[in-house]
Amino acid sequence: MEILLFIIIGFFGTFIGTLAGGGGLISLPCMLLLGVPIHSAIAANKFSNTISSLSSFLVLLKNRNIKLKTAIVVAPFGLVGGITGGLIASSLTEDTMLSVAIFLLIFALCLSFVKKPKEVNRIEQDIPKKVFPIIFSIGMYDGMFGPGQGTLQMYTYLYNGFSYLSSMALARIVTFLSCLGAFSTYLIAGHLDWKVSLSLVIGSIIGAQVSVRLASRLSSKHLQLILRAITVLLIIQLSINLVF
């Protein structure tokens, strides 16, 4: 019964997380309520995100929503950022990270109401250099704590001319690498509970596959509404966590 609960948690967390980010704020509290230690819960979440993000990225790559060369260009920044964040996670308090997350998400939400740049068919040379340090910073934040990192990534790519599905693809490959980097630090530290992690992965893979197929059937307007709604919910939940 407990394994089934983790599978369900993995499904819903990744389903929402793939569409608009913020899936960790579904899966992490649920795991904590079931008695999973905080470090083991974060490690399991990073592990499931690693697998599910790769699986959803491969679908988007197969459907030609992104070019492999474009993903390769941004990939190292997510990987190094995740490793860096995982290494320094213990030096920052949760309240500090919550405050940072709330500020960034409010900024991103405000940005969503600014006129979006015209979408272009980007190739790897067209990625603005200013995006790279942002990707690294979000990857580092993901390695340290991570709520809303996928949402922040989506806004980053959307407002640099990428389509919604291309933004989703880039967010998935960077999430894969930042979580892989962070997960390696938790694994070395001995925080991984394999029963929880593998159960979460099963649900996460299913959730990722369902969400990418649903996204291809929705209009850009509907996807933007989902992204904004998830952002508002993230801000509310993080603010409640910070206060209480």
Image: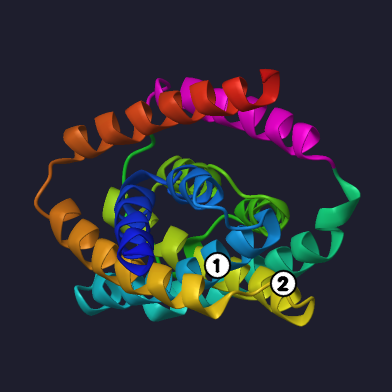
Q: Quadrant of the rendered structure where residue 241 is?
A: top right
Side (left or right) of 57 relative to 241: left
Residue 44 got which mark?
1
Image position, residue 2 (x, y; %): 38, 63
Image position, residue 115 (x, y; %): 38, 24
The residue carrying pointer 1 sits among few (fewer than 14), some (14 to 19) or many (20 or more) residues within 10 Å by Cα, namely: many
Check disc 1 and report its element: helix, strand or loop: helix
Image position, residue 190 (x, y; %): 75, 78
Image position, residue 207 (x, y; %): 27, 61
The residue type indicated by label 1 comes to Ala
User: Is disc 1 in contact with disc 2, using a CB cutoff of under 8 Å?
Assistant: no
Side (left or right) of 140 relative to 195: right
Per the image, is 107 magenta? Answer: yes
Check disc 2 and report its element: helix, strand or loop: helix
Instruction: Give the quadrant of the N terminus.
Output: bottom left
Side (left or right) of 176 relative to 11: right
Specify start and end residues of the magenta stretch as a single range.
93-115
Side (left or right) of 181 relative to 8: right
Query: Is residue 66 among what the camera can see?
Result: no
What residue appears at the point 68 percent right and 50 percent down from the top-left corner?
145
Q: Where is 31 relative to 104, above or below?
A: below
The residue carrying pointer 2 sits among few (fewer than 14), some (14 to 19) or many (20 or more) residues within 10 Å by Cα, namely: many
| Residue at the extreme left of the image, as rendered | 217
The foreground one among 115 and 151 is 151
Distance Cα–Cα, label 1 vs label 2? 9 Å
Circle 2 sits on which residue?
186
What residue appears at the point 70 percent right and 79 percent down from the top-left corner?
187
Instruction: Give the quadrant of the C terminus.
Output: top right
Q: How is the image coloured?
A: rainbow
| Residue at the extreme front of the image, as rendered | 1
The residue type indicated by label 2 comes to Tyr
Name the chief secondary structure element in magenta: helix
